[in-house]
Amino acid sequence: MAHPDVPVKSVDVNYSKILFWSLAFLFINWIGPLLCGKYADTSFDFVPASDIPSQLIGLIGSSVTHEKWCPHVPTQLDNRIKIPSNFNQSFDIAQVKNYQYKDGAYSPRHCQSRYRIALIVPYRDRLDHLEKFLAYMHPYLMKQQLEYKIIVVEQADKKPFNRGKLLNVGFLEAQKMTKIDCVIFHDVDLLPVNEYNMYACTHMPRHMYSAIDTFRFRLPYRELCGGTIAILARHFNVVNGFSNQFSGWGGEDDDFCKRLAGKQLEIVRFDPAVAVYVMLPHSKTTPDPQRMQHLQSSLARSDVDGLNSAKYEVLSIDILPLYVRLLITL
Ligand code: UDP
Ligand code: MN
């Protein structure tokens, strides 16, 4: 029999400790939430699914008679987050390739949509994502009976990618095309899973995802404005849009959250079972080394750095079958 001080024995004890803590970690992070039937973080405030229709803002100043409105889209009351198992196979650009924009926009044929939106996508060199996005989003948005246009703002130059500035340009140019009261800024790699996550504006700016696969269906922090935001045009004007200063990855979204808070515009989010997204896989782009520095002066800059200071050149505007393409240099 081995003596208690023999090293072999103490190695055994360490293994069992590792095993214990690994199991505890697994239980706390995976099995526990699974048993509860819920992944999402409950420490955030979410609009419950049943309240969603009452939170949406319909067309402003429309004179359409009541009988012609499209029906409200019902909300889903089951509060589990469900990702269909075949989710990754449901992209087929051929299914929507015959779909044509009329004057650069879609609207339902048989009824008057309650909501009109511009979906603005910042873009450069991610064709695979763009194809999947369009193949997925058109049927999704049509099902919601929205009047919508998808505007892809493509950075033509080789400078570091500037998401905030591209979104400002998309907004400024969209306003020249038609009157738009509600705009949704949307990364090309984000796909909404639940069809009840209405692509319309709420009284306050809405951060569109409450649960996303890349964060294990939780939100890392409250002041998160990344990925996709639905906001009334007048609110976007109030905060002077995004900062133009962030080039390269990161920062512009946190800066935007600060702008909203600075104007007392409080972010809302829908029930995580409804506002659930997946992100198409990609590698990380180079971070902006100055992003932390810029974030220190967010509010001091907001009135002079944004929509009112965005300098850019439009190379072309193409109304394509599936989207409006704005090609620009910054
Ligand atoms: N983007 C792009 N090309 C790039 C970098 C970014 O089109 O080279 C756009 C795209 O819409 C992408 C968004 O900017 O979804 C945000 O960038 P990324 O996905 O790299 O950021 P993260 O997912 O890390 O927030
Ligand atoms: Mn991404």
Image (cartoon, rainbow, N blue to C red):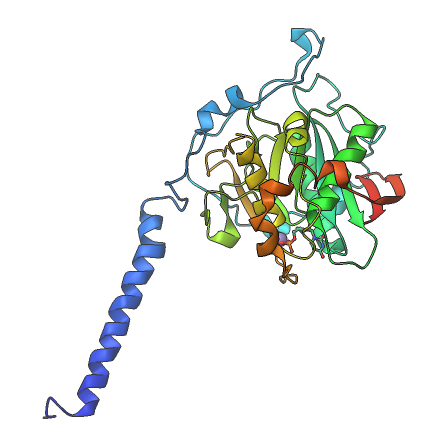
Q: Residue furthest front?
A: 300
Whole-percent x, y for residue 142 in the image? 69, 30
Picture layout, residue 203 above or below residue 222: above
Picture layout, residue 56 above or below residue 169: above
Can residue 145 be seen here? The reply is no
Whole-percent x, y for residue 125 in the image? 77, 56
Occupied quadrant, residue 177: top right
312 left or right of 6 in image: right
Please give the name of the residue rendered at 33% of the width and 61% of the height, measured from the top-left corner.
Answer: 26
Q: Residue furthest right?
A: 315
Picture layout, residue 248 above or below residue 312: below
Residue toward you, 271 or 75: 271
Residue toward you, 39 or 182: 182
Please give the name of the residue rendered at 36% of the width and 44% of the height, measured from the top-left corner.
Answer: 37
Whole-percent x, y for residue 200 in the image? 62, 28
165 left or right of 226 in image: right
Q: Quadrant of the N terminus?
A: bottom left
- The total of numbered circles placed on residues is 0
Please give the name of the residue rendered at 60% of the width and 37% of the height, measured from the top-left corner.
Answer: 229
Can residue 9 be seen here? The reply is yes
Whole-percent x, y for residue 53 in the image? 53, 22
Residue toward you, 90 or 17: 17
